[in-house]
Amino acid sequence: MKRFLLLYKGPPAPPDPSHEGWPEWFRAIGDAVVDVGSPAANGVVLHADGSTSDDPAGLNGYSLIQSEGRSEALDLLRDHPLLALGGEYAIEVFEVPKR
């Protein structure tokens, strides 16, 4: 099995309405869930020169799933509740090699 990091991207959304359906989705994909993850908030960007700024890239949270490959991982995400919020929201998927 391969592991995939899911990065939830989009504008900030209130936690209650934007997370409707999440517990059901996690239950539906069952053993594919490695870590349900967490929402992300109050981000800061650290630049190479040591300066900081408050304009992170719209990361709203993360999860970790597993599947046989990228195609199967994408199939698991087709009905993810975040995507139902509309075109401003997206899920970035990265394979995380096991050590």
Image: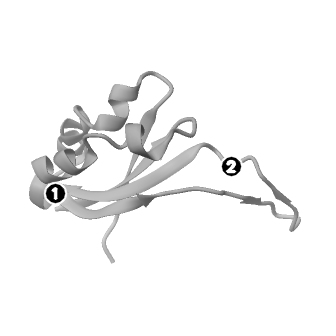
Amino acid of disc 1: Ala
Identify the residue at the far bottom of this view: 99
Residue at the location (53% across, 36% down)? 10
Pointer 1 residue:
32
Q: Are marks 2 and 1 in contact (CB under 8 Å)?
A: no
Q: CA distance from mark 2 to mark 1?
A: 29 Å
Q: Which x, y percent locates residue 6? A: 38, 51
Residue at the location (57% across, 35% down)? 11
The quadrant of the image that shows the C terminus is: bottom left
Residue at the location (42% across, 55% down)? 62
Pointer 2 residue:
56
Is residue 24 positioned above or below 80 on the image? Answer: below
Crowd band around label 2 with a 10 angstrom C-alpha radius: few (<14), some (14–19), many (20+):
few
Helix, strand or loop at mark 2:
loop
Q: Which x, y percent locates residue 23? A: 22, 51
Q: Nearer the viewer, residue 51 or 69?
A: 51
Q: Nearer the viewer, residue 86 or 21?
A: 21
Q: Which x, y percent locates residue 74? A: 25, 39
Helix, strand or loop at mark 1:
helix
> Going from the N terminus, do you reach mark 2 or mark 1 first?
1
The number of numbered discs placed on residues in the rendered structure image is: 2
Residue at the location (47% across, 53% down)? 61
Identify the residue at the far front of this view: 16
Crowd band around label 1 with a 10 angstrom C-alpha radius: few (<14), some (14–19), many (20+):
some
Q: Which x, y percent locates residue 70? A: 25, 45
Is residue 56 positioned above or below 37 on the image? Answer: above
Amino acid of disc 2: Pro
The quadrant of the image that shows the N terminus is: bottom left
